[in-house]
Structures are given as C-alpha cells and as structure tokens.
Amino acid sequence: MIKTIKNLFLLLIILCIGACTPNNSNTEPDQPDQPGSENIVILHMNDLHASINNFPKIAAYINQVRENNDNVFLLSAGDLFSGNPVVDQYAEKGYPMIDLMNRLKFDASAIGNHEFDYGQAILNQRISQANFPFICANMDTESATLNQPKAYITLKTKTDFPIIVLGLIETQTKIGDRYIPSTHPDKVEGIHFPYYKYTTEDYTNLKTDNNLFIVLSHLGQGSDRTLADTYDEIDLIIGGHSHSVINSPYIQNKALICQAGSKGNYIGRIDIKIEDGLVISKSAKLIEVENLSETDTEIASLVSEYNNNSTLDKVIAQNLAPFSNKDELGSLMTDAINWKVKTDIAFQNSGGIRSWLPFGDIKIRDVYELDPFNNEVIVFEMTCSEIRSLIKSANFGDLKVAGINYRYLGQGEIQLENYDGSLLDETKTYKVGLSSYIASAYTFNHTDEGQNAFITTAECLIDFLTFKEEINYTGVKRIFGESN
Amino acid sequence: MRIYIDHTPIETFKGARLADALLSYSKEAYKQLQLKQIWLEDERGNRMEADGRLWEGIELFIKHKTK
C-alpha cells in the first residue's frame, strides 16, 4: 500500500515537471494516452503548386512528428500542380510531385482546380500513381475521361476512432449556364460539378458524437466560412485555393478553419484530444518551413535529382530564321494565345517580352526566359471601339497583336484591319485575349468584366511551338503607321 | 468582380489573383508587394499570398513591413 502511494506521488511529481517545462520543440511529443483518451495530430498543406524545394525540410518535420505521436495524419487541400516547370514539364507531367508525396505518406488530397491543368487522362495517371486517395464530393465524372473520385474517406486512429474527411472543390467559374472550377472549360469536359453547399448536406449525416468530421476544402477561405456557418456538423475545415496564411486558425460557428499559405512554405498542425470517444479539445497553428533546420537527406537528394534533370532542355520546335525585333516575337506569342485559347484577337505588351528565342533549337527553358512572369490569359468580349481604346492606352507600338493588324492614322486615331487590309466589322464584338498584366495595368473601356482562361501565356507558347514544330516569323509585321 | 483594397472598390476580371487586383489598384503597391515591402490581409487579419484567388466582395488591407 505504502509502495503504491509512493509510486503515485512520484508519478505526480513527474507529471508536474512535465507540465511546467517549456517545450520549444516543433514536434511536441504526445502526453501518454490515458485509458479512453487519445491525441491526434493532423498535418496539412495546400496549393503546393508543384513546388518541391521545401520537401526535404517538410519530410524531416513530419518524420519527427510521427516519431513522437501515434496518430499522425497528413492531408493536402488540393492544387498540387502548376507553378514549377520542373514538375509541370516533366516527361510524365506532375510525376515528381506525386512521387514525393508518396514518400511523405500523404493520407489524402482534395482535388483542386489546377489538378485539371494537364488534362483528365494525365490526372487519371497521377491518381493511379498516388498511394493516397484523391477525394471530391461535388464532382460527377459519369461522361468524362476522369475516373470518379471518392467523395470522402474514413481514417482511423490506433483505437479505431473514426475521422471522416470529405473533399470539396470550388465552382466559381460560370461558362454559359454551367459552373466549373477555375480552369479552362475544355479541361473539365463531361464533368458535372454540383454546388458545394448543397452537396455537403448529403454527407452531414456521417457526423456522430463519436467521430471527427473534416472538410478538406479547395473552396477558398470565403466559402469555407459560409460552409461553417451553414453546417453545425463540421468540426474542422482544412482549406486551400485562396492561399491564406492563417497563423491563428479560428472557430467559425462550430468549425475550426485552417489554411497553410501555399507552395509548401507552411505546414499546418492541428492537435486534437479525444476522451471517451469525444473530442474534448482542438487547437491549430502554422509551422514556417523556412525556420525548420533539419532536412531529410534522402528526399533532398531526390529533389535535387528532379531539379537537375533535362526537362527544361527538351527541344520543342525549330526556329528557321532568327528574330530581328520584338514585333516578330510578339506576333508569335499572340498567335500562341489565339491558337490555344481560341480567341479572335490577342495582345502582348512589349514589357512582357524579356528575352529572345534562339535561331535553331527552341527549348522549354527558352520560353520561360522569354516569358517568365506567370501571366495568365484573360478573355474579354470587346467592340472595335473598346479595342481601339486599349491600343490608345498604351505607348506607340507597345501592344503586339495577333488576329488583326492595326494602323496609327495620326491625331490619336487607330484603324483596325484584317490581315488582307480590309477594315474590321465595326458591328461585331470580338473575343480578345490579354495577358493578366495588360488586363490589370492598362486602363481601357470594356463592358465585359473579363474571364480568366486559367492558362499562362508561357504555357500557350510551349503548346503552340510543340504543335507547330517549325516557325519562321521573319518580316511579320502587324503594326503600321507612325507615332504622332 | 468587385473587391476592396483599403476600402477602395476595385473592378477586376473573374478568376483574378491578389496580385492582379493589386496591380489594378496601384502599380506602386504592386511593385512593393514583389519587393516584399508590403503584404495584404483579409478582414480577419489573415495574410493572403500574391497568387491567392480572390472572391467577390473580399476586403483586403495593405500592411507595411516595419523597418
């Protein structure tokens, strides 16, 4: 009896010391689980956008957390792809990203709008490559190439406590009477996307007193709040899409809302305590990856291998004659927009042309040097008068063009011509593709607010050159007249 | 799409990123964002990164890095 009291006293002292000792470690080991109690750690990232350079530090951190905790789950809230040519232009597009995520043992990823960027067939390949499921509840792929993803998964802790994870994707883009995620409509052909708020209602019955109901959301923080306000059943929303750095995750209605910036610059960490099958506490924070010191050497070596491969040195076309001025280069770049986005007219500003394409072999790397700004193509329905207003808003000859010629007539007048010299039909409206820089920085008349085509001008050019195989822009001239 | 930066309404295209809207608001502020001299927060004080997609009606506030 005395021995038992002594042991209890000793245990009390140990617990007191433990509770009072500051813990500066980022990995925060669990308190030992009491009977009927359990600690869960959920680590999450979102909008990785093909960024792989932080993976060695991320891997080291995750390994440490796993060493110190029994129940660690790793989730991604979507947009794994698009943003790094090393991954996006890899022979098997996106392969390095999934390879690295497999090695870090992700448990699930939501499907984000950029998952469609390589096309549905390639997305199927990447999903097959993944050792983790891609989930999305508000997506019906019945008449599409893409295989139907699971709406949700159930993760289990060591004591079988269930964690429901429901995937959702934003549908902010309206094309005709159809709502789709922020991507080009061709990329999601045949897929129906029900509104996330209505879809969620079909799954809220999964919530019980004895489980955790998580939404892995690629909706953006604004919609995450709406969702939390609408459904009391949601315990946790792990978000993406808006690239919000939520340093202090907050409770909205009953849900804890979290999001971890983008590009693997942050790891979100959520700590949940379960007692007798009930969630008794949940807290969350962000870990800034830059501040982590440990790296996983195996992952570092793999990242280095991917970074040093010859992806960007792939020859995609032959340039049969050297470019002699920016008008020729701009003509090529705008032809690429018209071809890829199916616009009638396209413009590119001189400032967006940053280098020359070489004579002979054109490599992928050359395109990114020519057009490094990650500008996207924005499409406007415009009248001739609005197009003239755009040209007038720029310096003389600044806007390179495809689809038409234009001529300075003096006194600030501009004439729009077809390539054969005839005048444009003033009664028509034209589909005009602009870089996002022009759409944002230039002041011009337009009644159409503009719609993002969700493809970069550089991607248009790579696809165009790959399609054409050979180019020759010698003497191409589409801007005429003289400065006033 | 209408959003707000420091209470000023900005009309931008559908599918705009934060950097696009900031460029419409002020070229100077856009440069400062690229130089990391400023950042933008939403109405709850959460920083939004330059590539983050905006939504209708979002209110953003410019924050200056203190020296």
Image (cartoon, coloured by chain):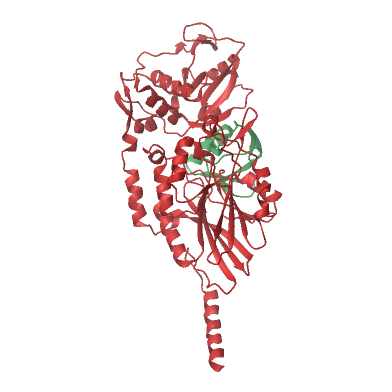
Q: Position of residue A26 (x, y in %)?
A: 48, 63
With A61 as the anchor, is A362 left or right in this view?
left
- Visible residue check, residue A410: yes
Residue at the farthest left position: A360
The chain whose colour is red is A
Q: Position of residue A156 (x, y in %)?
A: 55, 61
Residue at the farthest front position: A142
Residue at image location 49% in from the left, 66% down from the top: A69
Q: Position of residue A247 (x, y in %)?
A: 56, 54
- Visible residue check, residue A45: no
> As rendered, which of A155 and A248 lies closer to the eye?
A155
> As rendered, which of A366 and A114 lies closer to the eye?
A114
Q: Is residue A199 above or below residue A284?
A: above
> As rendered, which of B40 and A121 lies closer to the eye?
A121
Q: Position of residue A21 (x, y in %)?
A: 51, 74
Q: Quadrant of the N terminus of chain A?
A: bottom right
> As rendered, which of B32 and A296 lies closer to the eye?
A296
What colour is chain B? green
Quarter of the figure with residue A206:
bottom right
Marks counted in the figure total: 0
Q: Is residue A41 above or below residue B46?
A: below
With A480 as the anchor, is A449 left or right in this view?
right
Residue at the farthest bottom position: A2
Residue at image location 37% in from the left, 19% down from the top: A325
Q: Is residue A345 above or below residue A140?
A: above
Q: Is residue A446 above or below residue A12?
A: above
Residue at image location 41% in from the left, 13% down from the top: A477
With A250 as the anchor, is A87 left or right in this view?
left
Residue at image location 56% in from the left, 16% down from the top: A388
